[in-house]
Image (tube, rainbow, N blue to C red):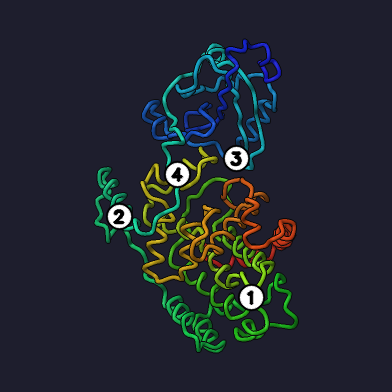
Amino acid sequence: MNIEAAASIPLSAQKETIVRSILLQDKTGRVQVILAEHSLLDLKSIKEKTGRDLIAVSAAELEEFYASERLTKLSNIPELNNVTTLLDQTIAADRLVIISSANSAGAKLLELAVLQKDLLAFNRDMLTLKFAIDPSNLSSTAPNPNEDAKRIVHSLRTFTSVRIKQRLEDTLEIPTLPATAQRIIELRVNSNAVVSDLADIVESDPSLAAQVVSWAASPYYAAPGKIRSVQDAIVRVLGFDLVGNLALGLALGKTLELPKDRVDGVTPYWLQSIYCSTLVEAIVTLIPPEIKPSKGLTYLSGLLHNFGYLVLAHIFPPHFSQICRYIEANPHISHMAVENHLLQITREEICLWLMDLWNMPPEVKATIQYQHDPSYDGPHCAYPNLVFMALRLLKQKGIGDAPLEEVPDELFARYQLNRDDVMDKLHEVIESAEEISSIAQSFPS
């Protein structure tokens, strides 16, 4: 039965339940899972009930599978080559079930309609189990910096019960702030600092100096003539604030390694960061001078907006892979909700704690805390607001891991921004993909 044929179903039965179909796999084979559209697929629950350690099929394999089965929108119910189906028991038997499956970009790969009881009759290999978590039971609220220490301790105590027995100070093995980063932060608060002071710090780190000169010579900045020195890069092309913040971001990037595991199909960490910081910097140029935030700090905020990703992988390495698998299986659920469910803490909370230890600028801390809340209008709100905007716009172009959602009109109005002008800046950034990729490659891999 397809969606068009649903009209023949008695009206009493035409109460729709929107569900989603996820294809999982392990060494034994593939399993189709059907659950309510917005609920969390709990992989641990499935493992407990079936004994199978299933993970989501990769985006590329998923599209290939649906193509091979000739499944399209408004398709008849597929047999899926005898793939076992797990149906969450919360799906009511007398409901019209709209099954929808999409690829990583949100494009529909499959959509069909059927009564739940007919679905059971059709698929003899279907099992009805409880493995979904209602979204109302998930927390994806912004972190409260006053609660960070308490929640970190609580989270670690929780893990002690599952044999993570390190003491708090052992578990939170965070590297100290690099000397270069310390000197740059000290320079930022020195009202008498001059270009030569910053150039001296950058030049004390040969790899950093080479990167600054390379950035300045990038076609993205289109500087006239040859860039001959760090001071030349600062004065003629990049400016004091931008060089300081680029150097600070690069220095921090060296403190934590990129995790070897990551979510399938997601933009590489530093590439997303550079795209975000570049777009935020471009948007700032459109804001009227009387309300314009610091260009350098907006760049730094964009660069470090997801630094908690690295911190989380560093602190909880045994569980980071599990987080990745959950996000793959639940692309519609925010990473904060997934992390709260699995760890009772989020990357943003841990990162805020670290930023406090490192005495980072309050603008950066506000960005980390409120980047998911477009309504935030408290201190330093421009920084998280603009990062929120940049990440959503980039996601519309298939870049980054933000939710696929529109930027509210109120956010454009708050900074007197014309949406069309901002979209023009987005297109300029996208067209500079090669230069942005080159800058991203400067960061640790």
Residue 284 appears in the rendering: yes
Mark 2 residue element: helix
For the residues carrying marks 1 and 2, which lies nearer the camera in this image? 2
The residue beneath circle 4 is 337
Q: Residues within 10 Å of mark 2 (few under 14, many from 20)?
A: few
Mark 4 residue element: helix
Q: Residues within 10 Å of mark 3 (few under 14, many from 20)?
A: some
Which residue is located at x 57 percent, y 77 percent? 241
Q: At which x and y percent is residue 281?
A: 63, 67
Mark 3 residue element: helix
For the residues carrying marks 4 and 3, which lies nearer the camera in this image? 4
- Left or right for 251, reference 217: left
The residue beneath circle 3 is 59
Residue 437 appears in the rendering: no
Q: At which x and y percent is residue 183?
A: 44, 81
Q: Quadrant of the N terminus?
A: top right
Specify the amino acid type for callout 4: Ala
For marks 3 and 1 on the same chain, the one whose residue lies earlier in the sequence: 3
The residue beneath circle 1 is 214
* Discs 4, 1 touching: Cβ within 8 Å: no
Q: Residues within 10 Å of mark 1 (few under 14, many from 20)?
A: some
Say if 394 sits above or below 93 in the image.
below
* Discs 1, 2 touching: Cβ within 8 Å: no
Which residue is located at x 64 percent, y 23 percent? 112
Mark 1 residue element: helix
Distance from Cα at disc 3 to Cα at disc 2 = 38 Å
For marks 2 and 4 on the same chain, the one whose residue lies earlier in the sequence: 2
For marks 4 and 3 on the same chain, the one whose residue lies earlier in the sequence: 3
For the residues carrying marks 4 and 1, which lies nearer the camera in this image? 4
Specify the amino acid type for callout 3: Ala
